Image (cartoon, rainbow, N blue to C red):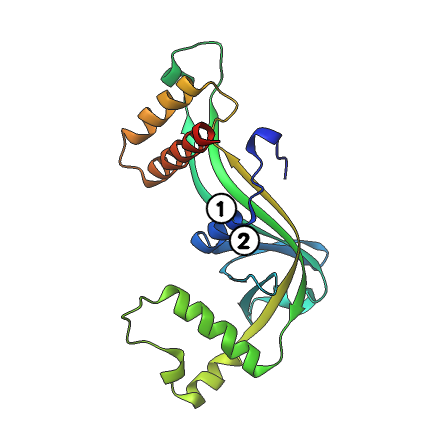
Amino acid sequence: MYVPKHFKMDEEEAIYDFIEKHSFAILFSQHNQAPYATHLPLTLNKSEHALYGHFSRPNKQWKDIKNQQVLVVFQGPHSYISPSWYETMKAVPTWNYVAVHIYGTMELIEDQEVIFDSLNDMVNKYESRNSPYHLSKVDSEFLDRMNKGIAAFKINIEKIEAKAKLSQNHPEERQKLIIKHLENTSDQDNLQVAALMRENLSKRKNS
């Protein structure tokens, strides 16, 4: 991913937090000698420096993915930015966004205990704290049948590229005008981008 120095994210915890919040990713690999992608949720294991997930077995991407170096893309909020917002004709439109790319080696998991733990982590992540649903309460025979329909995997992380393009290359006053226009909307992506821009300006003042 092209990451100019203005937009590079290099704080590990901030990157991990982003992955946790935007964990529905796109997994790219080579399948039958052509690019192939699947949209799927992934869980991050910080201590192992790894991502866990699973394919549906009818999705043939898993068939030839073992030991491949794969690319995972986590996409955050994004917004169109108009030059009219900072009242100049000496500029062109752009797009603000946050994204993290992870490169790693794919490992298919056969150990049923590890598979259960990874599925349990995923369920616990997305179910609310007060939810009555727990994987440990699911009928074991039913769960065994369901597990036969998936191909579980672990991605050992080798490289992370993280980019937050939030108008940092513009003067502070121009950034404030962009924030004002983004906040004057009900669009959730716009509001999230505005909040991230405010956070950046605050960090700059306190640094």
Q: Is residue 161 toward the left or the right of residue 89 in the image?
A: right
Q: Are the residues flagged by discs 2 and 1 in contact, CB closer than 8 Å? A: yes
Seen from the viewer's position, the closer of residues 106 and 11 is: 11
Residue type highlighted by circle 1: Gln
Residue 16 numbered mark, or none = none
> Which residue is denoted by mark 1 in the rendering?
75
Quadrant occupied by the N terminus: top right
User: Which residue in the structure is indicated by mark 2?
Assistant: 26
**To which quarter of the image does residue 177 belong?**
top left
Residue 93: x and y in percent read 47, 21
The residue depicted at 43 percent of the width and 37 percent of the height is 78
Mark 2–mark 1 distance (CA, rounded to whole Å): 9 Å
Q: Residue at x 52, y 50 (%)?
A: 13
**Which structural element holds mark 1?**
strand
Residue type marked 2:
Ile
Nearer to us: label 2 or label 1: 1
Q: Which residue shows up at 49% across the image and 85% down it?
A: 144
Question: Percent from the top left, x then y, of residue 37?
Answer: 58, 55
Task: Tell me the residue at 61%/51% (across/down).
Answer: 102
Residue 38, horizontal then vertical, whole percent: 55, 57
Relative placement, left or right, of 202 versus 71 is left
Looking at this view, name the residue that lies furthest to the bottom.
141
Question: Quick one: label 2, few (<14), some, or many (20+) residues within 10 Å?
Answer: some
For this view, does 73 lie left or right of residue 176?
right
- How far across and how far down the image is residue 166, in percent? 47, 31
Tag 2 secondary structure: strand
Give residue 127's quadrant in the image.
Answer: bottom left
**Residue sitting farthest toward the top:** 89
Chain-order first, disc 2 or disc 1: 2
- Dot 1 crowding, Cα within 10 Å, few <14, some 14–19, many 20+: some
- Classify 101 as above or below 107: above
